[in-house]
Amino acid sequence: MLRRTFLVGGLTVSGGFLLGLPVRSALAGNDTASKGGEIGFFVEVKPDNTVIIGVAQPEIGQGVRTSMPMLVAEELDVEWSNVTVRQMPLGIVKTADGYTWKYGSQGAGGSTAVTDNWDFLREVGATARQMLVAVAASRWEVEPGACHTEPGEVVCNRLGTRVRYSDLAQDAAKLPVPSEKPPFKAAADYHIIGKPAGVVDIRDIVTGKARFGIDTEVPGMHYAVIQRSPYLDGAVKSFDDSEARKVPGVVDVFKIDGPGPGEPYLILASGVAVVATSTWAALQGRKVLEIDWDKGPHQNESTESFWRQAKELLSGQGQVVRDDGDLDAALAQASKVVTARYEIPFVNHAPMEPQNCFVHVEEGKATVIAPTQSPSGANRAVASVTGLPRENIEVQMTRVGGGFGRRLTNDYVAEAAMISQKIGAPVKLQWSREDDVRHDFYRPSGLHELKAGLDDAGKVTAWTQRLASAGKYYRRPNVAQEDQYKPELYIDDFPAQVIGNLRTEWFEVQSGMPRGSWRAPAHTANAFVVQSFLDEIAHASGQDPLQLRLDLYGQSRDLPYGQHGGPTYNPWRLSRLLKHVADRVDYTAERPQGRAVGIAAHFTFGGYAAHAVEVEVSGAGELNIKKIVAAVDCGIAVNPLGVEAQLEGGTIDGLSTALNLEITVENGRVVQSNFHNYRIARMSQIPAALETHILPYGDKPTGMGEMGLPSIAPALTNAIYNACGVRIRKLPLRDQLKKALA
């Protein structure tokens, strides 16, 4: 397909220049026909010479509403202060072959937005600039090459003249889109990319004007809550709503049927919905419901039974995921063998904004206003509930008060659609914090068993990792059994391709716990396991943990990487980061007893990060985190302020999780309910000395949302061991130190 079919120019009703770029198949996502189509990403030059730039991805706190328009603005060559950003709704178009997307892929997850759109958005800006230059050159009767741009203007030095973009806009809108791809700026000429930029709507956020999903208010709207089954795969046997209907403001109460045990899910759980004229009334009505629950098939499941099952599985043979060299022979010949087991718990996403969604199902159409990471998934969910054509379902995206992978699943959207269709009116469904903690798609829990063989010189010659876990692919009907391991053990992750004799093996633990994507998915668990085990190997063989890593990472080279973040990765880039954080934390300095440093690094979704942590542990087991140094290599940092914020936020989130967080189960029910027993880290647990560093590399950015989290936990626990000799092999830390040192 010729490039001219992708670019569409035009004139706005106000006389401005509009340039759109419809989706290309590479950006479209898996559920689209990707046949091209209507106006997409656009830049609009207004008559007052200001510019509106559209952004299609949802803003979940990762900064895309700022960073992605920066790409367009740079190549367009305008002043960033003259740019306004417009959030695009879901752009869905019906075609003869299915569906395509006006604005390209519009999801937010996996740190892909900036990477996938790096060339795409710069081309939009560069093409618009090229067309504006063409108009100016024609007016001045010179070649376009005699002209150049300065922010918001076309300039001809030969003639000593210049003209604003706005004065060229109407004529530019009449031009055909150039058939040749315009040249991009040299990086040395950037005045927006790579320069710190504040969040475009930060004033609205701090003054309370920003609208999140929970802020949605529409005339005539009803409010709803659901009392969901507290039991895994439980169901409503019967209920008495007589008292609930007496609550002032309650207008309806009815049952919501969830999936049966083992069935694919649209919503997460069965329950009883209460609809009212206010959220408060709905909550009060829910309080007085009397429900008799069918406890379902998992009523005897517990955290204890989960770990018992995992240990039993590891005594047998699992699914071999990767098998390089001759592991058994290498272990038999090893001078030293090191083994360890590590436990990773279920954890909750705990976004600050609980799940919520507005849906209005009408005759032949529906409107959705939702804080979602997957607007196309929201559209699909409503279509599944209502039977409406997908092109008749409008999805508007609000700013999202935290996602972390939870809002990739649109069960709450489906619930809201069910309720709106049932009552025949617009409705906002609101989850409470308790709803959010007890009904989640949790990060998978798993038991990791590792073994390494070393030769006489201390070189690691053999490595095996065996994992028993309940996988992320929860009830996915189109995933083959032999592929269930894929989101749990990334087969190309370090030390694959670095240690010649290597085997990874997976065992499936049966559990009724819903599972899903949780910030960097398996990297959070595997980084803790692998980076902790490297320290164990170093100490067991009398080696320095940093030098051991540097030797393993080796020289700069690109290794094949078939998982998300590939197609290659370069372990040497981790060495560069480790040496930097080690230097910043003064790794080799003498420290008093009870005080020490730990390090760790990890490759995640195309980016590289490392942490160094300095801790102090008292004789009674009191932990004091003195300093954290975090460094990231994410290619070009489009917005350094945004990168720093993501690195700092990921570090704190990872630290909070390592210190405190665990979801447990008793008698088929989640135990935790709110922040009193699911304790997000308090300010007192976060050190004042938290440094962030950006080490640019190459000429293309990677994503940033996931990078700062995986390596903080092992850096912390490695530091603890170095300080007091207590090896942490089970997360969260909680009171393990006090018990060990009592």
Image: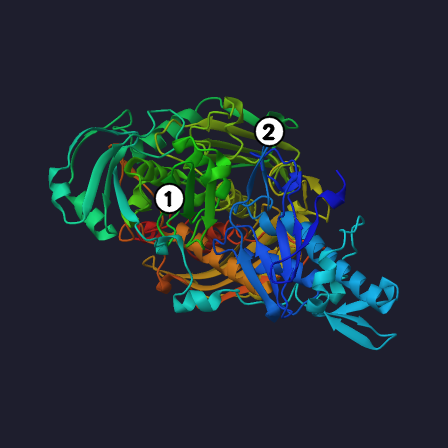
The location of residue 689, given as percent across then percent down, is 47, 68
Query: Type of residue at label 2?
Result: Arg
Picture layout, residue 607 above or below residue 613: above
Q: Mark 1 points at which residue?
A: 359
Res. 267 mark: none
Q: Quadrant of residue 656?
A: bottom left
Left or right: 14 as drawn, with respect to 379: right
Q: Nearer the viewer, residue 208 or 665?
A: 208
Left or right: 106 as drawn, with respect to 360: right
Q: How many labels does the image show?
A: 2
The location of residue 691, given as percent across then percent down, is 52, 65
Q: Which colour scheme is used?
A: rainbow
Q: Name the residue under label 2.
A: 322
Q: Residues within 10 Å of mark 2 (few under 14, many from 20)?
A: some
State which tag comes first along the sequence, 2 or 1. Answer: 2
- Label 2 secondary element: strand
**Do the residues under discs 2 and 1 have CB atoms within 8 angstroms?**
no
Q: Residues within 10 Å of mark 1 (few under 14, many from 20)?
A: many
Left or right: 361 as drawn, with respect to 565: left
Query: Type of residue at label 1?
Result: Val
Identify which residue is drawn at 84% across, 77% down. Answer: 160
- Label 1 secondary element: strand
The location of residue 460, given as percent across then percent down, is 62, 39
The location of residue 313, given as percent across then percent down, is 42, 25
Quadrant showing the N terminus: top right
| Front: mark 2 or 1 | 1
Residue 196 visible at all: no
Residue 503 visible at all: yes
Identify which residue is drawn at 36% across, 27% down. Answer: 309
What is the spatial separation of the Cα atoms under label 2 and label 1, in whole angstroms? Answer: 46 Å
Left or right: 414 as drawn, with respect to 62: left
